[in-house]
Image: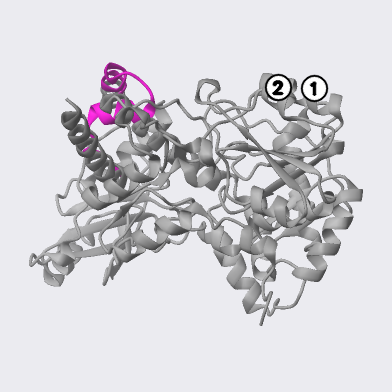
């Protein structure tokens, strides 16, 4: 049940527990317990809402920043990653294989705010060798959901 | 002009679904639960192969029986899924949907007067195809108390010395019924005893929610007397690509190939290239879709229980077949009134044979949100009918 449960709540964390039990073919109490276990084990880390900010009047700018760093003796990349992820404007930090080391995603109110963050805070960290900032112009698909267009049922209404 | 048309064609009953379709398509805002095809788009990697084949200019006929690679992949697939070996050169024919295979299969097998046993409720094509092939359809009425499975006794009772062929439509559209090992073994014994042929339409083989689907050809002595029909429509959500296939003994496939060659030439080339990709890399997509169907199936079963609507639990395809006999209406009346009052379209069970009277086919090839909306309306409707009865 675990894998199927995770697949469902990953897409819809607001699903009713009773309904979840029905579609999984188990008892509601089992779902409640399993979710509690998954939360306790840190497998389920949160229940977020996907928002297409574009459609609101609220200004948001997001960017991807490639960061090259010098790993530190005995601590590898963890220490520097931690220094970066503690900033609240940073939404994610990934260690990446290939041409650079850390991929940092950032959300801010304006281009200025983000460039300010990169030049004042990120680039000035001792272990940071270089950064390359890419601003996101448009989100087509995010977290497996297509934002650009709505699903439309184009099938014939009755078929054998 | 006199005698312009064929008497045989004129006498064919039009599909019961057609009439309903005409009413529903007039309504803009009807919510339909009447569709017999997946709601998923064909997985992108499969579509991509189709597009790629067009870009490369593979726009010619393939050989009549189908692309060699595709026939080989079909054989790998039946081996992988059912453990059955077919020879790709002589025992496989790629057709325009499973429907073409049904048609040419009947025409290849039947002589005038040969009886064809057709269990119903079932897909709408068997009976007219049997008639057009010169056969005489003999209907076996499946029963709710047997969960709409075919029993050995029912089969035995229907066999005469003119019986040539049994159509085996499982997993079943419209009932969702399946046949398990015991059922198949018992039926197979009767088939062997009377030495009849089988057309096993297993287009929903991938969509079973109990154990893995078992094909009649896996039962001893059956492969040599069975045309196995399958296709890409349901498993890979490829209805519009019109691609299916038949596997069977060389002697039968050879004759079917002649008909196919003269009527069709070959199945669509683009679809065939896409289908190769489906069989090579599509197992995961099938699993994902099947998981989603199963969740919806459970949702519906629960909804019917809560509604107090009698319904056996179906373990195949993507249909449920609830009973509405308690309301004292025909299936068609019920469906028409439901459409009129709640704008929810379902298909009357009678569209799939007279013995579908008293039942509805409800498809769960819809998103859960869509199902919830429609089932809510159905529940209101049922409640009103019950209130009026008291």
What colouring style does the render use? one colour
* Element under disc 2: helix
Mark 1 or mark 2, which has the lower sequence index? 2
Q: Quadrant of residue A66?
A: bottom left
**For the view shown, which residue lies furthest in the left direction?**
A57
Residue at position x 63%, y 32% from top? B213
Residue A13 within the segment the image draws in magenta: yes
Q: Main secondary structure of the magenta part?
A: helix
Instruction: For residue B102, say whether it is visible.
Output: no
Mark 1 vs mark 2: tell me if same chain.
Answer: yes
Relative image position of residue B220 (x, y in whole percent):
83, 26
Assess whether mark 2 and mark 1 are in contact (beta carbons under 8 angstroms): yes
**For the view shown, which residue lies furthest in the bottom direction?**
B1
Q: Quadrant of residue B258?
A: bottom right
Q: Chain of mark 1?
A: B
Residue at position x 32%, y 32% from top? B328
CA neighbours of label 1 inside 10 A, class few (<14), some (14 to 19), many (20+): some
Residue at position x 41%, y 25% from top? A1
Relative image position of residue B49 (x, y in whole percent):
61, 66
Q: Quadrant of residue B359?
A: top left
Residue receiving disc 2: B152
Which segment did they paint magenta?
Answer: A11-34
Residue receiving disc 1: B189
Q: Identify the disc placed on residue B317.
A: none
Asked whether, in this view, residue B13 is left or right of residue B32, the answer is right
Instruction: For residue B112, say whether it is visible.
Output: yes
Task: Quadrant for the C terminus of chain B, please.
Answer: top left
């Amino acid at each position: 049940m675990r894998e199927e449960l995770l697949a469902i709540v990953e897409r819809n964390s607001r699903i009713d527990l009773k309904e979840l039990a029905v579609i999984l073919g188990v008892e509601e109490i089992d779902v409640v317990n399993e979710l509690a276990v998954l939360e306790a084990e840190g497998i389920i880390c949160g229940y977020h809402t996907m928002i297409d900010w574009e459609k609101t009047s609220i200004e948001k700018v997001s960017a991807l920043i490639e960061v090259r760093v010098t790993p530190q003796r005995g601590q590898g990349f963890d220490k520097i990653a931690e220094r970066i992820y503690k900033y609240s404007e940073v939404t994610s930090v990934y260690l990446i294989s290939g041409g650079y080391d850390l991929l940092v995603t950032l959300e801010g109110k304006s281009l200025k705010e983000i460039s300010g963050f990169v030049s004042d805070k990120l680039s000035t960290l001792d272990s940071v060798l270089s950064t390359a900032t890419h601003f996101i112009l448009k989100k087509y698909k995010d977290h497996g959901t297509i934002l650009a267009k709505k699903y439309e049922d184009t099938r014939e209404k009755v078929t054998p | 002009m006199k005698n312009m048309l064929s008497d045989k064609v004129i006498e064919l009953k039009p599909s019961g679904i057609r009439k309903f379709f005409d009413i529903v398509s007039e309504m803009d805002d009807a919510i339909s639960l009447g569709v017999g095809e997946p709601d998923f788009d064909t997985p992108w990697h499969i579509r991509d192969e189709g597009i790629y084949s067009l870009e490369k200019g593979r726009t010619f006929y393939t050989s009549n029986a189908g692309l060699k690679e595709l026939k080989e992949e079909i054989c790998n697939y039946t081996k992988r899924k059912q453990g059955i070996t077919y020879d790709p050169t002589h025992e496989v024919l790629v057709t325009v949907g499973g429907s073409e295979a049904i048609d040419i299969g009947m025409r290849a097998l039947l002589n005038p007067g040969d009886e064809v046993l057709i269990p119903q409720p079932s897909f709408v094509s068997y009976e007219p195809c049997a008639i057009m092939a010169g056969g005489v359809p003999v209907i076996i009425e499946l029963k709710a108390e047997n969960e709409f499975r075919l029993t050995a006794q029912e089969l035995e009772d229907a066999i005469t010395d003119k019986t040539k062929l049994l159509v085996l439509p499982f997993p079943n559209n419209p009932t969702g019924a399946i046949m398990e090992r015991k059922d198949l073994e018992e039926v197979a014994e009767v088939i062997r005893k009377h030495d009849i042929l089988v057309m096993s339409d297993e287009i929903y083989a991938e969509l079973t929610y109990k154990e893995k689907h078992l094909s009649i050809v896996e039962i001893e002595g059956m492969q040599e007397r069975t045309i196995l029909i399958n296709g890409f429509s349901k498993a890979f959500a490829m209805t519009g690509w019109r691609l299916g296939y038949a596997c069977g003994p060389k002697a039968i496939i050879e004759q079917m190939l002649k008909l196919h060659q003269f009527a069709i030439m070959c199945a669509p080339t683009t679809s065939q290239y896409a289908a190769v990709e489906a069989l090579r890399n599509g197992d995961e997509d099938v699993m994902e879709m099947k998981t989603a169907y199963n969740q919806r199936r459970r949702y519906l079963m629960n909804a019917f229980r809560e509604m107090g609507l009698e319904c056996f639990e179906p373990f195949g395809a993507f249909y449920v077949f609830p009973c509405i006999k308690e309301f004292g209406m025909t299936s068609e009346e019920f469906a028409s009134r439901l459409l009129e009052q709640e704008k929810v379209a379902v298909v009357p069970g009678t569209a799939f044979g007279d013995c579908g009277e008293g039942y509805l086919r409800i498809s769960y090839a819809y998103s859960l949100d869509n199902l919830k909306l429609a089932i809510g309306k159905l529940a209101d409707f049922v409640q009103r009918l019950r209130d009026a009865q008291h």
